[in-house]
Image (spheres, rainbow, N blue to C red):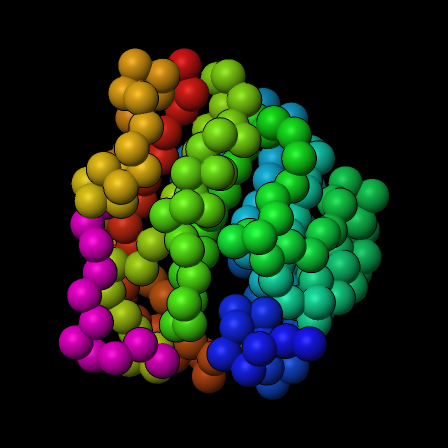
Amino acid sequence: MQEENSPQAFWERHYQGVSPKSSGRPSAVLTNFVAQRQPQRALELGCAKGDDAVWLAGQGWQVTAVDVSQTALDYARRNAEAAGVEGRISFAKHDLSQSFPAGEFELVCAVFLESPVEFSRIKVLRRAAEAVARKGLLIIASHGSIAPWSWAEPDTEFPAAEEVLKDLDLESSGWKEVFVGPSLRQATGPGGQTAQVTDTLVILERI
């Protein structure tokens, strides 16, 4: 049985109330930092409706895409089938606070892996770093500001990229900083409205 305020229960309610259709747009951080890399094995944490997983598979990556919501995974699988890339994506349900995909990956993405309900995010991000293969890339994208249609409180404080990096507590000699800092992005809301928002990016390459 799901606890009413657990991440699984929250995200199930969320995805049951939204359209199953893909936006058709990958995250900007992927197109900016991944498009030129050699496709190998990728892990996406919190795949939602599959926009990023489908794009990565279309670029030639073999993707493991996980989410805590079975509804989200069902949507993502259908969107992958519609795009003709389902053979390059393995979908799996994980509450990342309790379980984590096995193996190493040349790309590990945690793009907006955030939750309004209690979630041990830093613990999960540290585990994500452990899953990065040598010469692989770790991408952590967090919200640095909110759009007008966001459910976050207007006075929400967002940690800087440097704080996120510090909290990861990684051995500096084992990683190269590719980009650590804020990045502006044009966001599109559920009704097609747009707004400029700030993302907080931590992008590291394992040495």
Residue at image x 41%, y 46%?
A: 123
Depth check: 173 or 181 in front?
173
Q: Is residue 85 magenta?
A: no
Q: Position of residue 53 (x, y in %)?
A: 63, 49
Where residue 32 sits, quadrant-wise, is top left
Depth check: 96 or 202 in front?
96
Taking 43 as reference, is 16 above or below it?
A: below
Residue at image x 40%, y 24%?
A: 205
Q: Which residues are magenta?
A: 151-161
Q: Is residue 129 left or right of residue 25?
A: left
Q: Position of residue 195 (x, y in %)?
A: 29, 71
Q: Is residue 27 left or right of residue 181?
A: right
Residue at image x 42%, y 20%?
A: 206
Taking 151 as reference, is 28 above or below it?
A: above
Taking 12 as reference, is 77 above or below it?
A: above
Assign the C terminus to one quadrant of the image. top left
Q: Is residue 157 magenta?
A: yes
Residue 181 appears in the rendering: no
Q: Is residue 199 left or right of residue 136?
A: left
Depth check: 185 or 95 in front?
95
Where residue 13 sits, quadrant-wise, is bottom right
Assign the N terminus to one quadrant of the image. bottom right
Kindly report the secondary structure that dominates the magenta region of the rendered protein. loop
Residue at image x 65%, y 41%?
A: 101
Residue 159 appears in the rendering: yes
Q: Position of residue 58 (x, y in %)?
A: 68, 42
